[in-house]
Image (cartoon, rainbow, N blue to C red):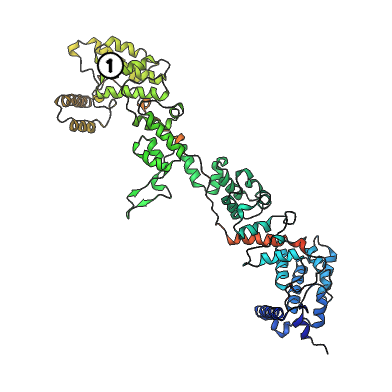
């Protein structure tokens, strides 16, 4: 009588195996049985000894392996029951094996079906091949599969690692590199293979390892539009447009763009600022907050900017400071209108400024003349105005203000003819210029002793004509010159004249200066040449992500499909079998 249990216990054991090997094989079979307790159910009992011997022809050894393969073949047939581009002969082989007549062509039939199937089907088959110990793979393929399936195995023997022609998608090489911290050693050829399909987190790992740069243009090989935009921002930020930055939520890019467009940066809304102290009283501004204050002429932020700006921009900032010592700057600094307020705050002209040197110097000369008039330093004012009126090729608006100041200085000397001649040089006509002409004509008709004081009292307080803040300015100056009787008398005279004008609502005796305050205003442009180039966007994926590695591992398993043999190889004493 045939003992039906004996084939199951001894299935797959070579006669040349040592006792230790046989004990280890028995323990492995017992472990597998415990992991799958459903096989102990009498109703699901495995095939008998005759069936087990027939299954050996198909390379399936042991009752547990038979049950696994039968479930696998059933699933493959069910998945393809709807038809499709699958070879009929392969389906017939699977049906024949399930019908109780296993044949040696089973591995080749399974491979033929998988060639038309989904990648997940390949992974499922490879998992069964590994867990059931089926000798369906070539020896190198079997070693590679064991390397992929064993999470504790980190080293792969060099002789089993696939060649470039065998590792068609680069998945095995990528998996091996991820497992052994060897991304930096991946060749450009392997990188080119894996870039189209690996998870974007793995692409980030490659970028961090320095093996993928902007020269590779990985965004061009990605199918997902959001991933393309993300990789473009990571590797070629200079090619990103505002729409792309908005789509991927790149707030740093958008903040930089808003600053360059002249929008104010609200420091209270800035993310990532350091707050010192329990109450958050000391708020450390970020780069754009400091640059905005520098654009406003705040010289106290220079030290803070030197800590934040890159080295080449720190040197530029120091050139701005050094130029303020003499009023000389290079052409590229002078062309940045966003630096003009800072340059004006750093530079105090010691003498008349030549407006011919640059557009900045022309504006600085105009402002210097006005400041001298307000300060009562008429000698320096005349010297500066003389240079301005000689600069006939300057801005017409600047020229008009210069001739108007020249007329005012002539008025202070009671040179009415000279003042009228200066006003006659103004291009065009404006209400304020006409007011000044009428003032001079009326004054010329009066006797010298009947004429009011020629100065504009608002200018004596350092304010433009009819300024609404004159009272506060008067009080500040009185406190400043409390011990100077002569200056106090001048201020009191100006105060009384303004009060009388407001009382009678008559400012007709006040020479209007300036004609247009906006002409004297420094530009509000951002200091574009101090804004650092856009930095690549920081990575947003998790380094060394397990799920990303699993995708690579499954792809590598799917690439082992060509290693399925046309016929099962005979297991040797090193081949693992289960019962």
Horizontally, is 1 left or right of 520 in the view?
right
Q: Residue furthest bottom?
A: 1
Q: Position of residue 340 (x, y in %)?
A: 39, 30
Q: Position of residue 423 (x, y in %)?
A: 34, 14
From this view, report whether residue 566 is shown above or below residue 380. Answer: below
Q: Position of residue 344 (x, y in %)?
A: 35, 29
Residue under the image location 69 percent in, 60 percent down: 158
Q: Position of residue 259 (x, y in %)?
A: 45, 39
Q: Quadrant of residue 97?
A: bottom right
Answer whether residue 64 is visible to the viewer in this image. yes
Q: Which residue is mark 1?
A: 409
Answer whether residue 526 is visible to the viewer in this image. no
Which quadrant of the figure contains the N terminus?
bottom right
SS at mark 1 in the image = helix
Q: Nearer the viewer, residue 458 or 270?
A: 270
Which quadrant of the figure contains the C terminus?
bottom right
Horizontally, is 12 left or right of 293 in the view?
right
Q: Quadrant of residue 510?
A: top left
Residue under the image location 37 percent in, 40 percent down: 303
Residue under the image location 60 percent in, 46 percent down: 213
From this view, report whether residue 268 is shown above or below residue 579. Answer: above
Q: Nearer the viewer, residue 304 or 360?
A: 304
Q: Nearer the viewer, residue 9 or 466?
A: 9
Q: Residues within 10 Å of mark 1 (few under 14, many from 20)?
A: many
């Amino acid at each position: 009588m045939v003992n039906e249990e004996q084939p199951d216990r001894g299935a797959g054991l070579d006669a040349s195996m040592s006792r230790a090997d046989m004990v280890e094989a028995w323990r492995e079979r017992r472990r597998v049985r415990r992991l799958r307790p459903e096989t102990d159910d009498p109703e699901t009992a495995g095939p008998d000894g005759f069936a087990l011997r027939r299954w050996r022809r198909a390379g399936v050894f042991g009752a547990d392996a038979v049950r696994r393969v039968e479930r696998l073949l059933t699933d493959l047939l069910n998945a393809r029951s709807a038809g499709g581009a699958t070879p009929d002969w392969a389906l017939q082989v699977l049906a024949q094996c399930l019908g109780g007549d296993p044949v040696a062509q089973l591995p080749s039939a399974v491979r033929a079906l998988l060639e038309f199937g989904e990648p997940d089907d390949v992974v499922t088959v490879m998992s069964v091949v590994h867990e059931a110990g089926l000798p369906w793979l070539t020896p190198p393929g079997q070693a590679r599969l064991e390397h992929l399936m064993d999470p504790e195995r980190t080293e792969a023997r060099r002789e089993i690692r696939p060649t470039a022609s065998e590792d068609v998608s680069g998945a095995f090489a990528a998996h091996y590199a991820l497992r052994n911290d060897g991304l930096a050693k991946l060749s450009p050829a392997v990188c080119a293979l894996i870039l189209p399909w690996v998870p974007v987190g793995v692409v980030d790992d490659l970028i961090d390892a320095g093996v993928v740069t902007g020269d590779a243009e990985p965004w061009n090989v990605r199918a997902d539009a959001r991933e393309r935009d993300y990789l473009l921002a990571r590797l070629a930020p200079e090619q990103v447009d505002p729409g792309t930055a908005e789509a991927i939520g790149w707030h740093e890019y958008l903040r930089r763009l808003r600053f360059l467009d002249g929008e104010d940066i609200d420091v209270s809304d800035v993310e990532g600022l350091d707050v010192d102290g329990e109450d958050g009283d000391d708020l450390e501004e970020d780069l754009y907050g400091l640059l905005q204050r520098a654009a406003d002429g705040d010289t106290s932020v220079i030290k803070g900017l030197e800590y934040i700006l890159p080295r080449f921009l720190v040197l530029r900032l120091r050139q701005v400071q050094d130029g303020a010592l003499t009023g000389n700057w290079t052409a590229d600094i002078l062309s940045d209108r966003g630096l003009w307020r800072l340059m004006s705050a750093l530079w105090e002209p010691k003498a008349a400024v030549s407006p011919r040197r640059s557009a900045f110097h022309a504006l600085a000369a105009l402002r210097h003349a006005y400041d001298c008039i307000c300060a009562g330093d008429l000698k320096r004012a005349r010297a500066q105005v003389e240079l301005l009126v000689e600069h006939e090729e300057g801005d017409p608006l600047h020229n008009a203000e210069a001739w108007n100041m020249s007329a005012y200085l002539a008025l202070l000397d009671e040179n009415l003819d000279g003042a009228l001649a200066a006003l006659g040089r103004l291009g065009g006509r404006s209400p304020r210029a006409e007011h000044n002409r009428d003032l001079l004509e009326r004054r010329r008709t009066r006797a010298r002793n009947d004429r009011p004081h020629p100065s504009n009292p608002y200018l004596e307080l350092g304010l433009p004509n009819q300024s609404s803040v004159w009272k506060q300015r008067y009080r500040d100056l009185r406190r400043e010159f409390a011990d100077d009787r002569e200056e106090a008398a001048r201020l009191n005279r100006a105060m009384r004249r303004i009060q009388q004008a407001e009382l009678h609502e008559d400012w007709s005796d006040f020479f209007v200066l300036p004609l247009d305050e906006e002409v004297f205003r420094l530009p509000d442009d951002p200091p574009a040449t101090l804004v650092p180039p856009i930095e690549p966007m920081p990575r947003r994926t998790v380094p060394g992500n397990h799920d990303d590695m699993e995708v690579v591992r499954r792809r590598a398993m799917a690439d082992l499909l060509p290693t399925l043999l046309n016929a099962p190889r005979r297991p040797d004493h090193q081949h693992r079998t289960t019962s």
